[in-house]
Image (cartoon, rainbow, N blue to C red):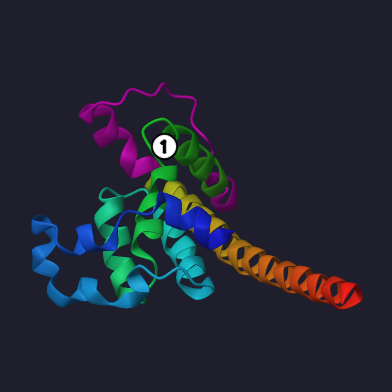
Amino acid sequence: MPKKLFKRWAPDPHKIRTNPALKFLGVLLHDPNLFHLNRHSVSVAFFVGLFIAFLPIPGHIPLAALSALLFRCNLPIAVALVWISNPLTIPFIFYAAYKVGAAILNTPVGNQSFAFTWTWLRDELPRIWQPLLLGSLLASLLFSCLGYLSIQWFWRWHIVSKWKQRRQKRRADKAHS
């Protein structure tokens, strides 16, 4: 089940390897772990993708791809997971991260209005960057660890349930013989 689910949504590895825009990566894309669907490659990909998704930095997709190459985990899953922080969810994620960071640093949360302009960013970023970064790092660590452990647990649970089904089927076949 997990393999079938992931394979259904994953892009074709051959298309990725032969993409002219990715030619600069050379043989790095030929590592089989980048496209294998096993418990280790998928759970590490969840860790990498979720960790990067909650960071307040630009370039999530290239960073996730390079991290997947570095950690030799499933590339499509790591890249897909960074889309958790998309243009619709980023304001909520970063505001919650800012509030958590401000609470930990005991920094008062300002009631200023938000305007996504260069002026607002220039004026407010020096004041909010520490709580935002701390909250984002904590969220990254929390959700990436939860993702890694959840995939490890789910994968094991699925395998054990398949073993039980096979054992029951063998017992039923023996009883009918």
Asked whether 118 falls inside the magenta stretch, the response is: yes
Residue 152 showing in the rendered view: yes
Q: Position of residue 136 (x, y in %)?
A: 46, 51
Q: Is residue 19 left or right of residue 61?
A: left
Given residues 141 and 13, the one toward you in this image is 13
Name which residue type carries label 1: Ile
* Location of mark 1 (residue): 90
Residue beneath the point at 32% across and 54% down: 11
Evaluate whether residue 55 shows in this view.
Answer: no
Say left or right for 99 vs 79.
right
Task: Classify 37 as above or below 127.
Answer: below
| Residue 170 percent coordinates (x, y) | 80, 76
Disc 1 element = helix
Q: Position of residue 121 (x, y in %)?
A: 28, 34
**Quarter of the figure with the N terminus:** bottom right
**Residues rendered magenta in the picture:** 102-128
Query: Which residue is at a point 22% across and 59% down the rendered structure image?
Result: 16
Seen at 36% across and 33% down, the residue is 87
Is residue 102 shown above or below 36? above
Total of numbered circles in the picture?
Answer: 1
Q: Please check the rendered image and state whether residue 63 is part of the magenta-colored stretch, yes or no.
A: no
**Front residue (pair 58, 111):** 58
Badge 1 crowding class, 10 Å Cα cut-off, few under 14, some 14 to 19, many 20 or more, is some
Q: Quadrant of the C terminus?
A: bottom right
Q: Return the x and y of residue 162 as percentages of the image width and height.
A: 71, 68
Residue drawn where x is 33% and y is 22% of the image: 115
